[in-house]
Image (spheres, helix red, strand yellow):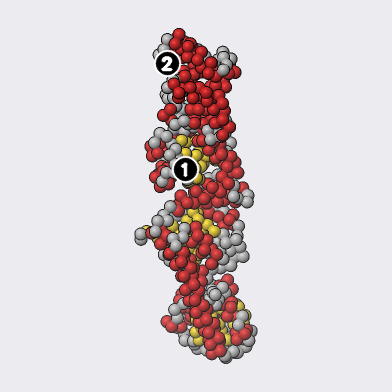
Amino acid sequence: MSLLTVGDVLRLPVIAAGLPRVLAGEERLAGPVRWVHVTELLDPASFLEGGELVLTTLMPQPNDPTRLRGYVDQLADVGAAGLVVELGRRYQQVPSDLVVACRARELPLIVLSRGIRFIEVTQTVHALILDAQGELLRKSQQVHEVFTSLTLRNAAPEELVRTAADLLGHPVVLENLLHHAVISCTAGGSPGQALEAWARRSRATPTPDQAANSGPEDWLVTPVEHNGQRCGRLMALPDASGRATGPEHTMILRRAATALTLARLTGHTRWDRSAHTSALLDLVRWNYSSHTEARIRIEALGMPTVSHRLIAVVIGHRHGAADEAALDDPLAEQLRSAGIRALVGRISPDRTGVLLALARASAWQPAVDRVGRFTKEILGEEAVVGVGPGVSELDQVARSFREAEDVADAIGPATPHRPYHVPSDIGLPELLHALRDDVRLQKYVEQQLGRLIRHDERHAGDLLTTLRHYLGAAGNKSIAAKQLCVSRQAFYHRLHTIEHILGYSLESGLRRTQLHVAVLALASLTTADDVQPETPDDVQPDLGIDVRDAPST
C-alpha cells in the first residue's frame, strides 16, 4: 500500500465537504503526504520536517506581497506537501500574490470555499497514514522473508531480479558500470519499451547514494555494491501505464539490491558472462518474438548491430568442459581491451560461443585470429576454433553459429593446426571426422577394410599401412614403396596379398576411391596418435576474405 498523496487527501469526504479548488501546483498533487499540520504561524517552517500538508485560514497573515512570498518560500524550501486555505474567516478570496508565489514555487495551493473542521481532517488523514505505514511495515517483513529465503538457497541474480519485478509490478533492470543491461525483467511489459536506446537513457540518469527517483524518466534507482565498492545499480522503470513508484517500491528495490550484494559475496559474480550466455543462447535458439526485440536486447548489452557485420565463432574444448572462468572471462577481457565488441558465453558444457560485431569496412580475420591465438594460449593447441559466415541481421546469427559448430565438429587430428578454421577448410577428411559417430560410416569401414584389419591382427602384419601409403600416393607404387622403405618387389607382393584378401583388383579407380574413403574414415575413428596427417603442418590458410566464409554485408 502506498502512502497518501495530496490528490488522495482532496478526495476524502472530510475535505470534499469544503469544495476544494486547486489554484497552483497541479503537477505536484501526486506528492506524498507524510502528515497534516494545522498552523496560523507566520514562520511555520521551523515546525515542519517536509511532506506535511499545511491547513490554515491565513488569519494573521499580512497583506504585504513580500511577506506572502516569504511565507510560501519557507513552505517550499522545507518540502511541504501543499497549502490548504479555508476562506471566509479573513479572506473571501485568496490573495493573488499568494497564488502567484505558489505557482512560482510549484507548491500545491488548495482553497476551501466552505468551512470544515480541521480536527476531523487531521484525525482522518493521520489514521489513514498510520494504517498505510503499518501496512508498509507488514509488507516490508514479507519482502524481507522472500529475499532471505532466496538468499539462503543461493538463488541466481536472474531469479532475484525477476522476483523484484514481480513484487514491484514494474520493469526492473540490473546494469553494470558500463551501462550494459546485464539482467532485465519487464514484468509482463514489452522488452522494447524498457530497453530501447538503453545506454543513452541510462547515462542520463544519475545514481543517488541510496534508493531514490532519478533522471528525466523518473526511474527508481539504487546502487549495488560489492566489498564496499559499487559494481552496478538496480532500477525500476515506470510501467506501461506510467504509474509512479512509491515508498513500497523503494523498500522492495532496496531489499533486492541487498540480496544481489549477498549473491556476489557467495559466488554469483559473473553477471556479464551470464548475460552474454543468455543472449547468445536466445539468438542460437531464436527465442525472440521479433527482430526489433532481439536488436534492443543485444544493444542493451553494449553490442552494436546496425551497419555491422556479425561473425559467429565456436570454440570447442577437445577434452570435455573447461572451467568457464579459465577461458571465457579472460577472452572477453582480451577482446574488450582490444576495442572489439563481442558477446562471450558458454553455449554448451564443452563449447564457448563468441559473437563479434565488426564494422563492415573492417577485415574480420584479425579479430578472429586474436580469438584463435588467445584460445590456444589458454587451452592448448588441441582447442578448435570454428568460424561461421558473416551475417548482417540478428535472425541470421543462428545459421552462422550452426555453420561454425559444423566446422568445429569437422576439425580432426589430421587437420593442419591453425588459429581458426572456416567452412572452406572442411575437406573429405574433415567431413568424415564430423560423421565419425554415424553407425553407417562405421559399417562402411568394416565392410571395406574388416578382412584386411583381421588379417593384420592375426599375422601381426602391416598391410593396412601399405594400403594407406598406396592410396595416399594416388596409386603410384614407386612413391609408396619409397615412403615405406621397402623394395618395389616386396611392395608388389604386399599389394598382391591385399588384392587376394579383399577379393578384387586395385587397378580400378573406383575401387581405390572407395578404399581411400574407408581408410580416411578409419583414421577419424581412431585416436589422434594413430593418425598421420596427409597435409604438411606448415601449410597456412589463405587469409583473404572468402565470400563463402564471411560475406560482406
Q: Residue furthest front?
A: 458
Q: Which element type, helix, strand or loop, lies under badge 2?
A: helix
Badge nearest the viewer, 2 or 1: 2
The disc, 2 or 1, on the residue closer to the chain's N-terminal end is: 1
Nearest the viewer among 454 and 279 is 454
Q: Residue furthest top?
A: 489
Which class describes the residues within 10 Å of circle 2: few (<14), some (14-19), or many (20+)? few
Residue at 59% over, 54% down: 192
Query: Do we see residue 130 in this rendering?
Result: yes
Which corner quadrant holds the C terminus? top right
Q: Which residue is mark 1?
A: 350
Nearest the viewer among 481 and 127 is 481
**Percent position of residue 309, x then y:** 54, 39
Looking at the rendered structure, the number of numbered marks drawn on it comes to 2
Residue at 57% over, 80% down: 9
Q: Looking at the rendered structure, which numbered label has been put on residue 305?
A: none
Amino acid marked by disc 2? Leu
Query: Do we see residue 99 in this rendering?
Result: no
Q: Which element type, helix, strand or loop, lies under badge 1?
A: loop
Nearest the viewer among 428 and 463 is 463
Amino acid marked by disc 1? Asp
Do the CB atoms of the residues marked 2 and 1 lie less than 8 Å apart? no
Residue at 58% over, 46% down: 285
**Percent position of residue 120, x then y:** 56, 89
Asked if residue 2 lies left or right of residue 369, the reply is right
Quarter residue 334 falls in: top left
Q: Which residue is mark 2?
A: 484
Nearest the viewer among 114 and 478 is 478
Which class describes the residues within 10 Å of circle 1: few (<14), some (14-19), or many (20+)? some
**Percent position of residue 207, x then y:** 45, 61
